[in-house]
Amino acid sequence: MDRKPLFDFDIRASTDKKKRTRGRRGMSGAWETSVRQCEHPGCDEDGKYRCPKSPDMLTEYIWFCKDHAREYNLKWNYFEGQTEAEMMDEMERDRVWGRSTKPLGNNDERLAWQRLGIEDPHQVLGDKATQNPGRESRMGGTRKLPATERKALEILDARDSWSRTDIRKQYKSLVKDLHPDRNAGARTDEDRLQEVVWAWDQIKDSRNFRD
């Protein structure tokens, strides 16, 4: 018995298209394989152009010839029967592809264990035992900043809501307290002083703080 070669098959796209039974659509929009007759009353032309039946039935079609399809489309009004408010709402949903948007950030005021679906009827966990305010909140942060500037605020013991003037006052106060002249020439705080100077260098020219 003759066996068919293992790799004797045609993988060309053109061959695959010929095997398909679904209709082919031409450049003009006509479904060339359609054998329907135009559904316009009194027309015996071929119905090769499909048009949606109504805005509520966009996947169900009426088949027309080219002239009657053009006439039907000129009279088509997707928003027919809708109020202006409904029309604007539909257009707004289409603007985001039908997906509603949510505000940035986490506005869920529940405790972390409550958000995870854990129940605590006996209050073993306590009111704030598992509250997770997030990294920025733990550091007193209220907005996004580069890592170097966030570190600088930690060193200066300042907050990101302060103005550059307030941070500068804090910086000067720390320099005075750490300077050897204020500590009888002792240089025990020299490393800390260098950190403070470095921190102010990160803040003084930053665009993230108002003057």
Image: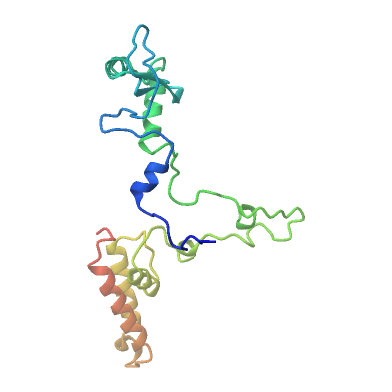
The residue that appears at 33% across and 33% down in the rendered structure is 25
Q: Residue furthest front?
A: 1
Q: Nearer the viewer, residue 80 or 93?
A: 80
The residue that appears at 29% across and 78% down in the rendered structure is 198
Q: Nearer the viewer, residue 104 or 46?
A: 46
Q: Residue furthest left?
A: 205
Residue 143 location (% of width, % of height): 38, 58
Q: Residue furthest right?
A: 122
Residue 122 location (% of width, % of height): 77, 55
- Image quarter (top left, top right, bottom left or bottom right) of the N terminus: bottom right
From this view, report whether residue 31 is shown above or below residue 15: above
Viewed as shown, does residue 138 lie left or right of 202? right
From this view, report whether residue 139 is shown above or below residue 210: below
Residue 164 location (% of width, % of height): 28, 63
Q: Nearer the viewer, residue 178 or 72?
A: 72
Residue 203 location (% of width, % of height): 28, 69
